[in-house]
Amino acid sequence: MAREIRKPQVQLAIRSFTRSTGLQGPALLYFLVVVVTGSVIFGINLSHLKVSFFGIYFIWTFLTFVSEKLMVSLFGYYLTVSCALHVSAYILFDTPTAIFTGVLASIINDVTSRRGAHKAVFNAAQYTITICLAAPVFYALKQSTDAVFSLRHDFLAFLLSYLVYIVANAVLVWCIVALTSGQKLTSIIQKDLRVETLHTPTVLPVAPLIVYLYQQEPLSLVFLAMPLLMAHLSFKNYAQLHLQTIATMEVLADIIDRRDLYTAKHSQRVAKLAEATAWAMKLSAKEVEEIALAGRVHDIGKVAISDYILLKNGSLSPEEYEAVKTHPRVGFEILSNLYLYKKCAHYVLYHHERFDGTGYPVGLKGEAIPLGARILAVADTYDAMTTDRPYRRALTRQQALDELRRCSGTQFDPAVVNAFLATQEQARPFN
């Protein structure tokens, strides 16, 4: 009888956990493997903590917690210098100290930030596993015997253990993101590597600096706070400037779209269609991001076109059509002045070029047209065809796809059309 009672209770608990976390199938299994493994490692190391290190545990947990709090969001990733505190902890003290202080600081940060219990548990487990993998590398390669750390003799040991830390931490996070988001693991890796190439070199020198200062005089760590804070603020300002520039351009693009009831959210849809096509063509994450950015602002040059022309119900006169044809160049002139849009600006400039060379504003032909512009041309035309206009009804999805096939090789790049069609075979139209 007892077994009959427990089984439904266990099943109910699993269902409740699945609903609250959104984890199921492979994602749930991976989560449990990481958490159980991390918990076992943490429990083993917990028994090796030293009472004499109580003050160190307090100070290092506080420092690590502060470093976690001072995180910066960039490209959808949260960056901190906490890894420098973790690495310096196992160099200066031991693995149990690094694990205990790192886990405690992570849990406090996640709880105070209200990220959810399952995220706090996973983060604590992955930090435990990461430190457990990285620390032995340093101990195995350490050369100096008369000092805790000698930069001259132990730099290779530090560098390799730091790289193990970065790779282990990244892999654990990549897998859970891939399993829970539905994104391809390769695309996640490409995006993250772009951020890490900026983040890792700036944080790498911090760990040996912390170790050196602590060895000379523990209180000297106080003087490290100001440079770290300044570095954090500089990086934060860079990230905010990046995000604010994109937000400003996209708001302007949306305002232009809303000038015409029929083109509302046109740029958003084009960006999504172009992004999906770029992934289908197996472009790099950076190229996909640039194409999606260009898609969001591809019509920004229409700011220079009067409402009379832009909203005209009937056919345009030759003079009016010439005015419309200026919008790619105007868009290029706006965007090319912004560092973030340097490459995107060329996609915007040429997105009305045709594969057969009869387009505008220059009349480029074939592969002389940048690939990003060729992708935008297909996405832009498809959305225009499937949207009602004052002078015509929207084509059905199938009619629009047939039209793309018909114009493949003349108006559009056949390779781009094929990739676009592949994304649409089982996809529903963007709303």
Image (cartoon, helix red, strand yellow):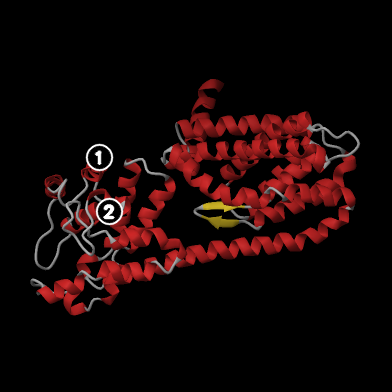
The one nearer the camera, 361 or 235, is 361
Numbered label tally: 2
Which residue bears the numbered disc 2? Answer: 369
Looking at the rendered structure, the kind of residue marked 1 is Ala
Instruction: Tell me which residue sits at (14%, 44%) in the image.
Output: 405
Residue 257 pos. (x, y %): 27, 68
Residue 229 pos. (x, y %): 70, 62
Mark 2, residues whose alpha carbon is within 10 Å: few (<14), some, or many (≥20)? many
Looking at the rendered structure, the kind of residue marked 2 is Ile
Circle 1 — which element? helix
Relative to 12, does residue 413 appear above or below in the rendering?
below
Asked whether residue 115 appears in the rendered view, the answer is no
Residue 55 pos. (x, y %): 86, 48
Q: Which mark is residue 422?
A: 1
Relative to 61, does residue 225 appear above or below in the rendering?
below
Residue 401 pos. (x, y %): 16, 46
Q: Which mark is residue 294?
A: none
Image position of 368 (left or right of 165)? left
